[in-house]
Image (spheres, rainbow, N blue to C red):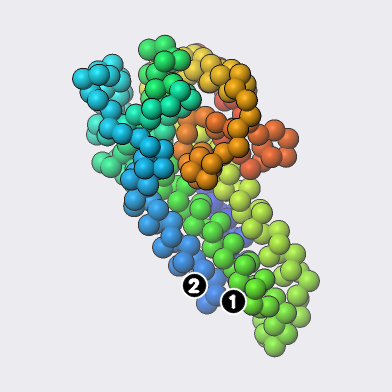
């Protein structure tokens, strides 16, 4: 309940921030136009999310005859969770990871890499799959889309103000004279929106961890899986993410790229240390 409450608060802040920026820069009409544009883009992304992400990751349908253990694990977890059986995909990469996507319970997709199957034990992998089904159960693709819509709308309004000079519209009866405050707002607001959007995704990761731990009956195996993936990440040379990797990082079980210091504020995932610490409550 705590993470659900935090997500609600974050979304409310995003909504309020959007309304403030829209009013200061473009009035109600401008704000609604920006919201409509952002909503169209993100709803389209949600609708085709499974096809887009699978193509970007080079994922192919998982061979049920070759990997019957994966099919059995997911089927058992889905039945225990009251979910339809999702489509299963595999990514031929040694990098260990997994993700879930899809616009609804009936259109869910769960994908794993060959690397994660090689690295984890049966119980650890099952816990990871439980986490991914948690994203499906909690409709996290929809929640992320809502957050992205408001963050995108704020960005649209701010960019519009910058390029059109709406900021200095002295003839605007509603606030043309308050240009300094509006200038600060259009610079700060998009950054704040991205920070809040990332906070939403981190909150949903905690919620999926909790869901997965409850589904398998313990947080021990999920914590062990997280530690193994973190150790693996520390052993490989630092990598520059490709555009496809950046675009899909928020979907992955763990962020494949290390982010420390202030950069962690823009991370799509909580730190592994934080996640393991919280999972200790479910041992």
Please state the horizontal and vertical placement of residue 10, each as a whole percent of the image. Answer: 57, 48
Q: Is mark 2 on a helix, strand or loop?
A: helix
Q: Earlier in the sequence, mark 1 or mark 2?
A: 1
* Residues at marks 1 and 2, CA–CA distance in whole angstroms: 10 Å
Q: Is 273 on the left-hand or right-hand side of 137?
A: right
Between 14 and 266, the residue placed more toward the observer is 266
Between 21 and 128, the residue placed more toward the observer is 128
Q: Is residue 137 visible?
A: no
Give the residue pinned by disc 1: 27
**Residue 189, quarter of picture:** bottom right
Please state the horizontal and vertical placement of residue 100, each as a whole percent of the image. Answer: 39, 35
Q: Is 182 on the left-hand or right-hand side of 196?
A: right
Please state the horizontal and vertical placement of residue 157, each as a whole percent of the image. Answer: 59, 68
Q: Residue at x 63, y 66 (%)?
A: 158
Please state the horizontal and vertical placement of residue 258, each as a whole percent of the image. Answer: 63, 31
Marker disc for residue 118: none
Residue 24, above or below 228:
below
Residue 236, above or below 249:
above
Mark 1 is surrounded, within 10 Å at the Cα level, by few (under 14), some (14 to 19) or many (20 or more) other residues, namely some
For this orientation, the residue located farthest to the right is 180
Q: Is 154 on the left-hand or right-hand side of 113?
A: right
Q: Is 249 on the left-hand or right-hand side of 43?
A: right
Tell which tag, 1 or 2, sits nearer the viewer.
2
Cβ atoms under marks 1 and 2 closer than 8 Å? no
**Residue 186, quarter of picture:** bottom right
Q: Can residue 237 be seen in this view?
A: yes
Q: What element carries label 1?
A: helix
Marker disc for residue 33: 2
Q: Which residue is drawn at 28% across and 42% down?
A: 107
Q: Which residue is drawn at 59% across and 42% down?
A: 199
């Amino acid at each position: 309940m705590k993470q659900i409450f935090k997500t609600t608060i974050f979304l409310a802040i995003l909504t309020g921030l959007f309304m403030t920026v829209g009013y200061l820069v473009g009035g109600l009409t401008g704000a609604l136009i920006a919201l409509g544009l952002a909503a169209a883009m993100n709803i389209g992304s949600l609708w085709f999310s499974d096809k887009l992400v699978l193509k970007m990751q080079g994922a192919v349908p998982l061979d049920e005859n070759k990997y019957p253990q994966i099919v059995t694990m997911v089927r058992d977890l889905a039945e225990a969770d009251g979910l339809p059986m999702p489509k299963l995909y595999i990514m031929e990469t040694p990098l260990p990871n997994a993700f879930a996507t899809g616009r609804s319970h009936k259109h869910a997709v769960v994908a794993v890499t060959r690397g994660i199957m090689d690295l984890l034990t049966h119980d650890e992998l099952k816990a990871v799959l439980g986490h991914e089904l948690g994203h499906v159960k909690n409709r996290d693709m929809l929640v992320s889309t809502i957050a992205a819509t408001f963050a995108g709308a704020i960005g649209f309004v701010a960019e519009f103000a910058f390029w059109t000079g709406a900021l200095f519209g002295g003839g605007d009866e509603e606030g043309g004279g308050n240009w300094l405050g509006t200038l600060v707002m259009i610079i700060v607001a998009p950054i704040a929106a991205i920070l809040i959007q990332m906070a939403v995704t981190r909150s949903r990761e905690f919620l999926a961890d909790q869901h997965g731990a409850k589904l398998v009956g313990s947080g021990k195996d999920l914590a062990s899986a997280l530690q193994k993936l973190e150790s693996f990440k520390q052993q490989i040379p630092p990598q520059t993410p490709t555009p496809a990797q950046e675009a899909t990082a928020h979907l992955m079980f763990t962020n494949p790229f290390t982010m420390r210091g202030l950069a962690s504020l823009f991370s799509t995932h909580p730190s592994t240390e934080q996640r393991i610490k919280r999972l200790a409550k479910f041992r």
